[in-house]
């Protein structure tokens, strides 16, 4: 699998000279499976650049079929949808997975982004692409969903007064876990969520804050880099990618977050865990 980061910021886009190295777009990650199938994790403004790249592939010819995993419906995770070029091309197909009790609930989330109050598109019916909406159960411990030979599992994390879905993607013995916007209690992730993370080749984890900032912003429902490090060590993952950086943090602050997290991982017995600070445009192969 090849994983590429297209947007790594949280809450709102943060363009400007102080964020040029890590990027200022909001959440979007792509996973290209060994089979060539494409999964897109969230649709923040980072999906706009991804869409332009995809126009050079089968998606530009109306022959593309991709999957989209929505973690939740906060704007920084869906605000790029009306500007994602492949959805305007007839013939393209997208299977959209998300935490909902029904397909109609997922449809309502997407329709809300193109509602005439927010967009001149007015309705998804004006888009060229076809959409299949697939709810992901959030209760009990459901078996993985199989999509195009890829196993997809999901468990909810607490996120302030609501929840945010974490996903595990598995293919041919390789695994990626995507866990944005996680606001754990003091005890850390639940046992169900730790099972989802367990042994992952790559854990992309919320690292919105420093521990100092999180201590005074707990109600917002995000993790610090320390929360990410503790989760990675407990789950014994191979790689940890810090993600969803606060929009007010400059690149220099993100550098410090990386350095401090590396020291913490080492002190916790996680020297074997490769650490990555997610950077817009960067890719890694698993």
Image (cartoon, helix red, strand yellow):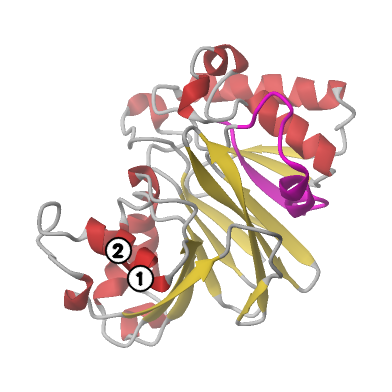
Of residue 234 and residue 22, the one placed in the foreground of this image is 234
- Image quadrant for the C terminus? bottom right
Residue in view at x 64 percent, y 80 percent: 35
Q: Vertically, is 167 above or below 231?
A: below
Q: What kind of element bears circle 1?
A: helix
Task: Give neighbour class at mark 1: few <14, some 14-19, many 20+ (Cα, 10 Å).
Answer: few
Q: What kind of element bears circle 2?
A: helix
Q: Are marks 1 and 2 in contact (CB under 8 Å)?
A: yes
Q: Which residues are magenta?
A: 184-207
Which disc number belongs to residue 108?
2
**Residue 151 placed where, x, y %?**
68, 72
Residue in view at x 76 percent, y 38 percent: 232
**Residue 29 placed where, x, y %?**
51, 54
Of residue 95 and residue 63, the one placed in the foreground of this image is 95
Q: Mark 1 sits on what residue?
A: 104
Is residue 34 visible in the rendered image? The answer is no
């Amino acid at each position: 699998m090849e994983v590429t980061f297209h947007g790594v910021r949280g809450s709102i886009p943060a363009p400007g000279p102080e964020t040029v190295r890590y990027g200022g777009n909001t959440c979007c990650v792509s996973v290209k499976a060994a089979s060539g199938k494409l999964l897109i994790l969230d649709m923040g403004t980072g999906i706009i650049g991804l869409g332009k790249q995809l126009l050079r592939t089968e998606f530009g010819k109306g022959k593309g079929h991709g999957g989209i995993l929505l973690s939740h419906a906060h704007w920084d995770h869906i605000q790029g949808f009306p500007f994602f070029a492949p959805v305007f091309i007839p013939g393209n197909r997208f299977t959209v997975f998300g935490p909902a009790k029904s397909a109609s609930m997922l449809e309502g989330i997407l329709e809300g982004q193109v509602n005439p109050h927010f967009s001149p598109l007015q309705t998804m019916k004006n888009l060229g692409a076809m959409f299949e909406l697939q709810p992901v159960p959030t209760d009990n411990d459901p078996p993985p969903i199989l999509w195009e030979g890829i196993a997809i599992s999901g468990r909810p994390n607490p996120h302030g007064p609501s929840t945010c879905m974490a996903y595990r993607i598995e293919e041919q013995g390789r695994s990626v876990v995507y866990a944005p916007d996680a606001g754990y209690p003091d005890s850390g992730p639940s046992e169900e969520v730790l099972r989802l993370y367990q042994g992952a080749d790559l854990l992309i984890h919320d690292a919105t804050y420093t521990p100092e900032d999180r201590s005074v912003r707990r109600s917002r429902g995000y993790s610090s880099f320390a929360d990410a490090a503790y989760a990675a060590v407990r789950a014994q993952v191979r790689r940890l990618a810090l993600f969803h950086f606060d929009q007010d943090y400059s690149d220099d602050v993100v550098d410090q977050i990386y350095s401090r997290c590396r020291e913490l991982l080492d002190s916790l017995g996680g020297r074997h865990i490769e650490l990555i600070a997610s950077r817009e445009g960067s890719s890694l192969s698993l």
